[in-house]
Amino acid sequence: MNLASPWPEPGSRPRLVLDAAAGPRAAQPSPTALVGWERAWKHLHRAARPLNPFLSWEWMSSWAASGRCEALVVGEAFPDGSLAGLLPLERARRRGLAQLQFLAQAAGGDDLDCLLHPAAPADTAERLLTAALARARCDLIRLEGLRPDAHLRLALQAVANTGALRRLQLEAGEWLPSLELPHSFEALLESHSPNFRAEVRRRRRALLRRLPQATVECAQSPAAIAATLEHLFRLHNQRRGQKLDRGIFESARLRAFHAAAAAKLGAVGQARIYLLRTPAAVLAALYGFQAEHRFLYFQSGFDPALAEVSPGTVLLSAVIEDCIRRGTRRFEFLRGDERYKSRWTSERRLNFNAMAARSWPGAAFLALRARVRARHARED
């Protein structure tokens, strides 16, 4: 296999090194240098399965450009120059320890892993991880939101067996509820209890009685998405504030990141923002991604002053109905086992987190963390 060169300059194409014995190459790109890898990254992303917008060039490059980011990206290429595998990471400092994590891990993506082409050799993930560890100085590896069948799961275990890691912990993460969509919205309602069906219909009628001009719109183009994001940010933060919680969009960096990422993903047909609105006001917003036959529900918000007419529930039901109409086969709620998600779904899967120590301080931190968690488990 040919190997990807150090990160190219902005606007250039990835160069290749013909010395296949050298192993995968790592690079520490500046945010603008991601431009040089756009074509190769997108080609690999389309080939890898399942399609995951949280591993896309659009998502990752937006994160790198949204603030200070010490990125470390490791890639390996086929002889024709196309990427066989890519592992996008970044270094961060938490609790006084240098940690290595997924690039954009703090942005909240799910089902994370390295990107591998279907024709990549079986040990590609292990080689990518080994190359990253050889380049990165860190105390801890903290990989969150991993797929249950992640290639990195086996890679971490293989690398740990070589003695390169002092301690490895694989832990259950969060539940990801999902819903298989039938041929019609009525069929979906019929698969639920009579009480649930009646409640969905009753809430729709109640909202339209009070706000007869209410409609649902969907922003898909970059320009339309840019015009709707402020509604999403405001309504999400208002709803979280009502629950005495902090909205994720209170962070200026996260707002800038999503403004860039949603626009880029909208340009390739993957981002969608739905609004429930009247001519005078926006009542609720829902932000998600279309990944081939799946819709990934990322965030939402609604006006707490209108909670009595359930604008959030009404919009969610309308989005699910629209997904069915468009031929989407699965509605993924992503992380979080909130009650309203479980009312719609009957399936869920568990992601997992991996933590590994590379230094004595890192190993001491994991040992202390394990003791604290064990004590809490006994107390519960």
Image (tube, helix red, strand yellow):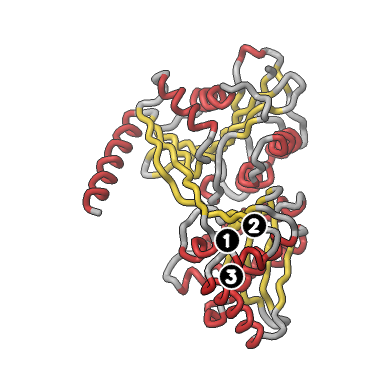
Residue occupied by mark 1: 299
- Residue 136 image offset from top left, x and y in percent: 49, 29
When the figure is inspected, residue 94 is found, relative to residue 267, above or below; the finding is above
Q: Residue at x 42, y 70 (%)?
A: 244
The answer to whether any part of residue 377 appears in the image is yes
Q: Nearer the viewer, mark 2 or mark 1?
A: 2
- Is 13 displayed left or right of 234 in the figure? right
- Residue 223 image offset from top left, x and y in percent: 77, 61
- Depth check: give the residue in front, 54 or 214: 214
When the figure is inspected, residue 134 is found, relative to residue 325, above or below; the finding is above
Separation of disc 3 and disc 1 at Cα?
12 Å
Residue occupied by mark 3: 234
Q: Nearer the viewer, mark 3 or mark 2?
A: 2
Q: Residue at x 28, y 36 (%)?
A: 367
Quadrant of res 321: bottom right
- Depth check: give the residue in front, 376 or 13: 376
Residue occupied by mark 2: 181
- Is 226 displayed left or right of 155 in the figure? right
The numbered mark, 3 or 2, whose residue comes first in the sequence reads 2
> What amino acid type should be assigned to the residue bearing mark 2?
Leu
> What amino acid type should be assigned to the residue bearing mark 3?
Arg
Q: Residues within 10 Å of mark 3 (few under 14, many from 20)?
A: some
Quadrant in which the N terminus is drawn: top right
Q: Residue at x 63, y 61 (%)?
A: 287
Quadrant of res 23: top right
Asked if the residue at tag 1 contacts the one at tag 3, i.e. Cβ–Cβ closer than 8 Å, the answer is no
Asked if the residue at tag 2 contacts the one at tag 3, i.e. Cβ–Cβ closer than 8 Å, the answer is no
Element marked by disc 1: strand
Q: Nearer the viewer, mark 3 or mark 1?
A: 1
Quadrant in which the C terminus is drawn: bottom left
- Residue 5 image offset from top left, x and y in percent: 67, 23
- Is 380 displayed left or right of 108 in the figure? left
